[in-house]
């Protein structure tokens, strides 16, 4: 029911039509002709309640954004830290690991690990050098009284071969059979000087039951079985 002389409520919010918030001071002036007892007071209270419960205006959002930004700057709001980056670290002999940059910057530098020395080159003994030297002359001609480097007799080949290893042997086969350290046939090692025919012929044991020797005229230096000649004894010089 509307009291005659009062403002009629038409369903339009006068506050929203103005586009902003409103206080009692913004309410319209009372109608002089309104009933002073009930009409104006009811309409005034109605408009104030509508203004109190209306939806907040979007014009207040910038103010709220400014307040949030200020709180972040002051440290009141905790912002998650950016993800940490990791760098690969290689530990010699162990492997490669991913270590965050924050931790890596605090670690002391890794000690330099010296490179391990490679295996030592095998050293050749004087006997091995003599064997290699004698075998290198296989095919050279036999010449009586020659001691190399292009032709040999039996004792001359033994003397020349050991000279390549820095060892000086007696010149004749008989002297070679008398010097050095005596060795039995069962204990022969490569490089031992073997005597045949009662000491008149010399050869060098090269392993696997063979000797290299300058046998006789018309026969070059060659490798032959130890058993092909009568064994008389052996001497070791290295």
Image (cartoon, rainbow, N blue to C red):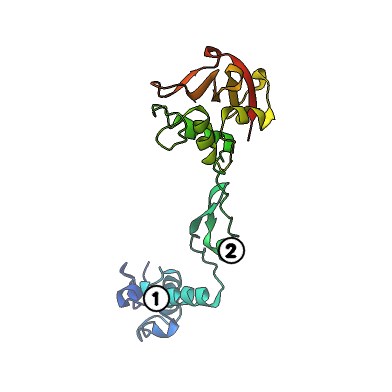
How far apart are labels 1 and 2 at the CA level? 52 Å
Q: Earlier in the sequence, mark 1 or mark 2?
A: 1
- Residue at 55 percent across and 34 percent down: it is 128
* Quadrant of the drawing holding the N terminus: bottom left
Residue 109's disc number? 2
Neighbourhood count class around disc 1 (C-alpha, 10 Å): few under 14, some 14–19, many 20 upward: few
- Residue at 54 percent across and 77 percent down: it is 74
Find numbered disc 2 in the image and state the secondary structure of the residue it sits on: loop
Question: Relative to residue 125, is residue 151 drawn left or right?
Answer: left
Which label sits in the foreground, 1 or 2? 2
Q: In x, y percent, where is residue 103?
A: 58, 62
* Quadrant of the drawing holding the C terminus: top right
Residue 65 visible to an observer of this rendering: yes
- Residue at 35 percent across and 84 percent down: it is 31
- Residue at 58 percent across and 13 percent down: it is 230
- Name the residue carrying label 1: 62
């Amino acid at each position: 029911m509307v009291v005659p002389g009062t403002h009629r409520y038409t369903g339009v919010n006068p506050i929203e039509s103005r586009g902003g918030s409103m206080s009692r001071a913004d309410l319209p002036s009372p109608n002089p002709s309104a009933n002073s007892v009930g009409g104006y007071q009811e309409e005034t209270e109605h408009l104030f309640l509508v203004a109190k419960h209306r939806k907040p205006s979007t014009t207040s959002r910038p103010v709220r954004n400014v307040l949030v930004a200020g709180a972040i700057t002051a440290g009141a709001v905790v912002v998650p830290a950016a993800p940490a980056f990791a760098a690969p670290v290689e530990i010699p002999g162990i492997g490669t690991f991913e270590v965050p940059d924050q931790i890596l910057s605090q670690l002391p530098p890794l000690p330099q690990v010296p490179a391990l020395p490679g295996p030592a080159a095998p050293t050749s003994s004087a006997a091995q050098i003599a064997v290699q030297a004698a075998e290198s002359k296989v095919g050279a001609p036999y010449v009586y009284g020659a001691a190399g480097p292009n032709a040999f007799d039996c004792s001359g080949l033994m003397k020349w071969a050991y000279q390549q290893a820095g060892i000086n042997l007696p010149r004749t086969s008989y002297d070679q059979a008398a010097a050095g350290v005596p060795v039995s046939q069962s204990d022969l090692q490569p490089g031992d000087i073997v005597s045949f025919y009662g000491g008149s012929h010399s050869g060098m044991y090269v392993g696997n039951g063979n000797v290299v020797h300058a046998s006789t005229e018309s026969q070059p230096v060659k490798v032959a079985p130890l058993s092909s000649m009568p064994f008389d004894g052996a001497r070791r010089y290295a």
